[in-house]
Image (cartoon, rainbow, N blue to C red):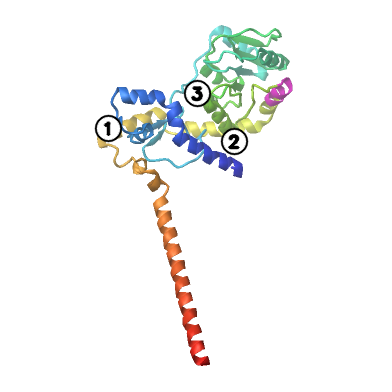
Amino acid sequence: MTFFERVENVLLRFLQRFIYPYLLLADYRAIQKEQGIDIDSDILDVMGKASLWISYSDLSLEYPHPTMPNYVRSGGMALKEPLPLEQDLEDFVQGSGNHGIIIFTLGSTVGCLADHRKTEIIAKVFSRLPQRIIWRHTGELPTNLGSNIKILKWIPQSDLLGHAKTRLYIGHGGLNGAYEALYNAVPMILMPVLAPDQTDTAARVVSKGMGVRLDPATITAKSFYEAIKEVLQNDTYRKKVALNSAILRDMPPAKDRVVFWIEHVMKFGDEHLRAHVFELNLIQYYLVDVAAFLVLCIMGFILAMLFVCGLCCRMCKKNNNSKAE
């Protein structure tokens, strides 16, 4: 990271530690009080005492970082092998020829972009492409739909991403959709529209060279078309996503890992897995007492040396004066 990115990182870490619990964990705090779960402790302290952490992440999409022994990666646990498409959808896909298809969806929560003008721009660009488009859309239909576009209120996303003719996935940056595209080695264009985790997912995809990110608020026909052209024509994206797909598939099945560690903790407890760092207070955690002690020792040594040097200088001066007399 650059210097200012590191500054931002420190400030966000501070906000997460001291402000985030009171803003975003209020519902969990209510459950904690209602169920009488260690009500005198801070919610983050309660979470820190968890025997096991199961994270929907995987090294194929995650940044490398150190973790505790009780942290289990389960990225891709919801993935499954693609099933055959219904006949009408299969016919549409097969009609794309060698150009293949592009899948566009903004997830199950967002059926369409809030700005209909952006939807018109997207439809205009899609109509120019030689590929066929399968577009999940539930809002007002654009007026300039091309014959190569098929709009559906629901799509079998996993099955489409696993189809041999799928060339590109355009999504909102949802983690599950990104994993499905990654698992099937499909390059991505991500347009985060809601939660910060979508932006985070897009950043990971971009950093690993598996796709590009667009801002739906500032998208133009030119930027959208050039992004599609870049990902489809630059073979680097397909190679990168194929590499990370192979990494994901090479890992032991996520479900097996999760089941193993749950059973392991049930058998042997968590004492050998859980770090006690969460039980330290802020002074101990940030080594404030150790730093203060070392600073005092250094200052004491310096003052002692200054005192000794001053004493030696006074004795030498006194001896010189005695000789002069």
Q: Which residue is mark 1?
A: 266
Query: Can the viewer see residue 53 in this picture?
Result: yes
The answer to which quarter of the image holds residue 280 is top left
Q: Quadrant of the N terminus?
A: top right
Q: Is residue 88 above or below residue 17?
A: above
Q: Which residue is mark 2?
A: 207
Based on the picture, tell me whether residue 259 belongs to the magenta stretch. no
Depth order, front residue of 221/6:
6
Q: CA distance from mark 2 to mark 1?
A: 38 Å
Q: Which residue is mark 3?
A: 176
Q: Which element is circle 2 on?
A: helix
User: Residue 310: where, in percent of width, then height?
Assistant: 48, 75
Q: Which element is circle 1 on?
A: helix
150 relative to 255 in the view: left or right:
right
Q: CA distance from mark 3 to mark 2?
A: 18 Å
Depth order, front residue of 294/71:
294
Look at label 2 and name its amino acid.
Answer: Ser
Q: CA distance from mark 1 to mark 3?
A: 29 Å
Identified at 29% across, 41% down, the residue is 271
Identified at 49% across, 16% down, the residue is 83
Q: What are the residue bounds of the magenta stretch?
A: 220-228
Label 1 packing within 10 angstroms: few (<14), some (14-19), many (20+): few
Q: Answer with mark 3 or mark 2, whichever residue precedes in sequence.
A: 3
Query: Can the viewer see residue 2 in this picture?
Result: no
Label 3 packing within 10 angstroms: few (<14), some (14-19), many (20+): some
Identified at 29% across, 28% down, the residue is 37
User: Residue 186: where, in percent of width, then height?
Assistant: 58, 25
